[in-house]
Image: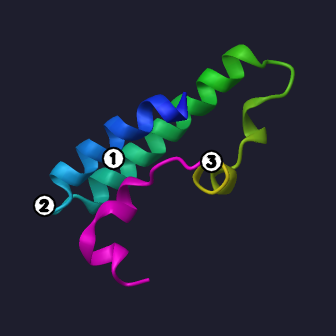
């Protein structure tokens, strides 16, 4: 599922990244992560939804972090 939504999130984020959207991007990230956890829990009830930490989501699975698309933030690292 992440492979399907990453391009949409990346395009949307790149389009709006030049505006003052850090707070909005952070809120959207949290909402999307909650929806992914909810979807995972719906289909894998026996494992629970907290078994997918955000570090694994952004690291191993390669989920796009909207805040990292903001140029002023991404060039600091």
Q: Are marks 3 and 2 in contact (CB under 8 Å)?
A: no
- Residue 17 in which image quadrant: bottom left
Front residue of this view, candidates 16 and 11 = 11
Q: Is residue 46 above or below residue 51?
A: above
Q: Earlier in the sequence, mark 2 or mark 1?
A: 1
Please identify the quadrant where the C terminus is shown.
bottom left
Q: Is residue 45 above or below residue 65?
A: above
Please tell me whether residue 76 belongs to the stretch shown in magenta.
yes
Q: Which mark is residue 57?
A: 3
Q: CA distance from mark 3 to mark 2?
A: 26 Å
- Bin the neighbour count of mark 1 within 10 Å (Cα to Cα): few under 14, some 14-19, many 20 and up: some
Q: Earlier in the sequence, mark 3 or mark 2?
A: 2
Q: CA distance from mark 2 to mark 1?
A: 15 Å
- Bin the neighbour count of mark 2 within 10 Å (Cα to Cα): few under 14, some 14-19, many 20 and up: few
Q: Which mark is residue 10?
A: 1
Residue at point 37%, 44% (across, down): 28
Q: Secondary structure at mark 1?
A: helix
Residue at point 39%, 64% (across, down): 68
């Amino acid at each position: 599922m992440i492979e399907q939504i990453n391009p949409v999130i990346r395009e949307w984020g790149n389009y709006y990244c030049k505006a003052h959207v850090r707070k909005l991007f952070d809120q959207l990230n949290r909402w999307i992560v909650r929806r992914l956890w909810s979807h995972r829990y719906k289909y894998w009830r026996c494992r629970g939804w907290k078994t997918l930490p955000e570090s694994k989501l952004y690291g191993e699975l390669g989920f796009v972090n909207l805040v990292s698309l903001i140029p002023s933030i991404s060039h600091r690292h």
